Image (tube, rainbow, N blue to C red):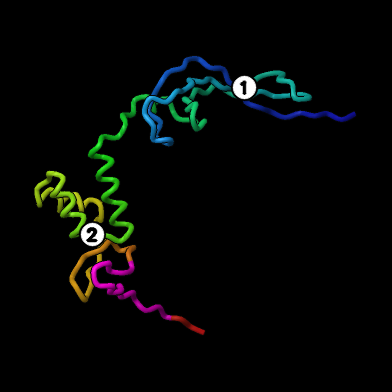
Amino acid sequence: MIFIWGSRNLASTKDTGRFYCPKCGKVDVGYRHQSARQWFTMYFIPVFPIGGRTEHIECTRCQTPFELTVLDLQPPTEDDLFLRDCFERLQRGRSLETVEADLVESGRTTEQAVGVIDDMTRGKVWECERCGAHYLKGVRKCRDCEGLRELPARNVQL
């Protein structure tokens, strides 16, 4: 005789609503507050529960499960998005001086802009020997003068 047994989660929806999904990055997306429990199955039929009940929030758009605390998250402000964009520009090869000018243009003082850049780079910068521009460590080439970052030589043993 062949026995087919296993386990599976069964979930029920306790509540629905709208929230900010950090994975989708969308505001006012639908969610399901679900309660789930693992069950022992025989011939794919749930027989008895084998685990405790767990609760989570599931985004109806991307189906990502989150802890219940995700409902307390606030969507990013315009300033948060601007700062994220500034950091991405640094990663793509913009000089610190260029991003600093963008921050000053957005209404920050020079001291505030320098502080923001220090927080973003955490001191991991290099200076182009040709023109003196500063870049994030991961950037290998100066956009202003095409100067290359001097990388430390590796000791290779054959």
Return the x and y of residue 133 as percentages of the image width and height.
20, 67
Q: Nearer the viewer, residue 72 or 30?
A: 30
Left or right, 5 with respect to 144, comes to right
Of residues 53 and 12, which is closer to you in this image?
12
Residue 39 at what x, y percent from top left? 66, 23
Q: Report the residue at 21% width, 59% height from top.
A: 96
Mark 2: amino acid: Gly
Q: Quadrant of residue 127?
A: bottom left
**Is-magenta flag for residue 151?**
yes
Q: Is residue 69 left or right of residue 52?
A: left
Q: Earlier in the sequence, mark 1 or mark 2?
A: 1
Range of residues picked out in magenta:
140-155
Residue 49 belongs to magenta span: no
Percent position (x, y) of residue 131? Answer: 19, 73
Q: Which mark is residue 123?
A: 2
Query: Looking at numbered disc 1 in the image, what kind of residue is underneath it?
Result: Leu
Say which quarter of the image contains residue 124: bottom left
